[in-house]
Amino acid sequence: MRRLSKSRFALLSILAGCSQPVSGGGGASPVPAPSVAAVIPVPSAPVTATPCDDARDFTVPREAFTDARRNFDAVRKTLLEDYYRDSLTEDDMYRAATAGMLERVDPDMHKWNKLLSPTEIAELRRDLQGELVGIGVKIDLDPATGYIDVKGTIAGSPAERAGIAPPDKIVTVDGRLYRGLTVHDVVADIRGKAGESVTLSVLRGPEIVTVPVVRDKVAYDVVRDMVVGGDVGYVRIPSFNAKTPALLRDALSDLAQKSVRSLLIDVRHNPGGSFDDAVEAAGEMVPAGSTVVSLNRRGKTEPVVAKSTPVLLDLPVAVLVDSDTSSSAELMTAALRDLRHATVVGTHTHGKWTVQKLEELPNGYAVKYTMAVFASPAGQSYEGAGLTPDVEVDAPPEQVERVEAITDATKRVAEDVQLRTALSVLSRR
């Protein structure tokens, strides 16, 4: 059984989400391109290239549905005997009923309550480990044309070594076209065994080039740190998975050795991920024994406390956020603001403050359902509303994505207005 604060992205390492522009958690906006959670960001419900669920009507009649079992059986019998297609089976009926029950029992949570197939569960579990076998390319699929837009690559990945980069468009994978198909189809074809080659046809400018890429293990969403502005320890957390707490601890220890005087945590474009790993990661930066978050479920409140010995506990802190900061990333932001008096800089966060649980079924499927709403250490939940920054500074999402790839601290500061603002804030603390 696994708890997730968000499921939002399928990685090939690929990060791809709803084809509409978004932010990342709850509310009316679809889930962002690159994420995943552990009491369930991606990422992420399973990612497809079809229109987002938000456009569908998930309302349910509120009149009492009496004599439910008998009426359910009547509908099942009618469909099996009189539906226009004669291929429906008992399995089809019960699978559809289970999926419908999850999505419609609580329309407000329909994006998170899902029936997951064995394949989807396997993908989700791999994503939550922070490592998989693929090529390390971030993509988005246009189902109308079948073209796969390259949004970026993971540092050190096979795709980066092969020279794949935006604005490349992948036309085929081992000769297969994807018009009318989904991102999952692309993922299934690009993933495989380490050491095996996959051949991409890439539209690069006016030419189609053939690019063979050897699959390998790819670590994605890695925590990275650097010193910016002379003496500020900067830590970028892209999402939360099983590797995040240890990587964050290493990053903070590295910055402590460099004698930084303040700390800047960047959770922009962080769609969430594993709830449990986010709590553990937050515990690396807040007082031991303090309440990191509270789970509110079925009328009861359950505090979740920090268990780690924190690093750099006495330094001033700022947190960078944007509209794609969601779920577990919002949890960490609120914990740092409540417990470390951190200054939050950026734009309004997404507002997904619910936790999902993954429960496996005997037949290999699993149900993902909402088990709690969470609240900040101060007892405030921002479900559907999101956190308002202390200092609001807007920046185009594409700019944030672009600067993430800059490893030179001076160039990074020069190109990132939100980062410069946070440094200015920290200089006055």
Image (cartoon, helix red, strand yellow):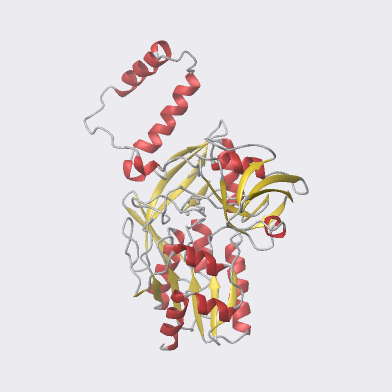
At x 62%, y 51%, the residue is 206
Taking depth in this image into account, of 346 and 5 the one nearest to the observer is 346
Image quadrant of residue 404? Answer: bottom right
Q: Give the residue furthest to the top.
A: 81
Taking depth in this image into account, of 94 and 295 the one nearest to the observer is 94
Q: Position of residue 11 (x, y in %)?
A: 59, 50
Q: Position of residue 151 (x, y in %)?
A: 56, 56
Image quadrant of residue 424? Answer: bottom left
Q: Give the residue furthest to the right.
A: 195
Q: Position of residue 418 (x, y in %)?
A: 44, 74
Q: Position of residue 130 (x, y in %)?
A: 61, 56
At x 61%, y 64%, the residue is 222
- Placement of the C terminus among the 4 image quadrants: bottom left
Left or right placement of residue 231 versus residue 417 in this view:
right
Q: Is residue 415 visible?
A: yes
Taking depth in this image into account, of 89 and 136 the one nearest to the observer is 136
Taking depth in this image into account, of 380 and 265 the one nearest to the observer is 265
Q: Is residue 110 visible?
A: no
Q: How many marks?
A: 0
Q: Give the residue furthest to the front.
A: 206
Left or right placement of residue 259 versus residue 354 in this view:
right
